[in-house]
Amino acid sequence: MQLIAFDGIDPNSKFLDGHFPGNPIVPGAVFLGFAEQGLRDIGYEIKCVQRMKFLRQLSPDQPFEITLEIEETLAKLAWISGTDTLANARVELRPTDG
C-alpha cells in the first residue's frame, strides 16, 4: 500500500544544509521522518528500526513515495522514485494514543 507520496522537497529546507553543498541529497534521517509522518496519519509510530538499507540517493527535486506492508506489529517500508528503490527498512510499530 502507498503510505505517502511527495512531488519533491524544497531545496532550501534547513535539513539539507551540509548534505552536500552544490549537490544536495536528502539525509537518511529525513527518510524516516517522512515515514513517521505517514504512519501517524494511519495511527502508528515507529517503535524501533530493525534494519534499514540505503540503495540510491534522493535529490530534493526528485518525486518519491513510501510504500508500506504491515504484519501485526512489524512493517516493511520502501522509499521509491519511479522504478528505483531508494531505501528499504523493517520496523516495529506501535499504535499512537488517540
Image (spheres, rainbow, N blue to C red):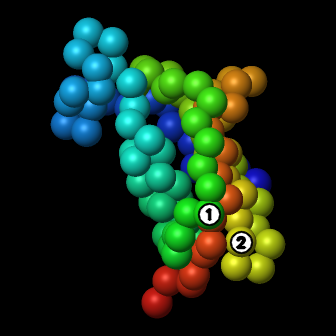
- Give the labeled residue for mark 1: 50
Q: Earlier in the sequence, mark 1 or mark 2?
A: 1
* Left or right for 70, reference 87: right
* Left or right for 26, reference 90: left
Dot 1 alpha-carbon crowd within 10 angstroms: few under 14, some 14 to 19, many 20 or more:
few
Residue 3 seen by the camera = no
Q: Label 1 vs label 2: CA separation?
A: 9 Å
Q: Secondary structure at mark 2?
A: strand
Outermost residue toward the top? Answer: 22
The residue sitting at 49% across, 83% down in the picture is 96
Choose between 10 and 31: the one closer to the eye: 31
Q: Secondary structure at mark 1?
A: strand
* Left or right for 62, reference 50: left
The residue sitting at 27% across, 31% down in the picture is 16
Instruction: Give, as a three-letter code, the residue at label 1.
Output: Gln
Instruction: Give, as a three-letter code, the residue at label 2.
Output: Leu
Choose between 64 and 90: the one closer to the eye: 90
- Give the labeled residue for mark 2: 74
Q: Where is residue 88, by image quadrant?
A: top right
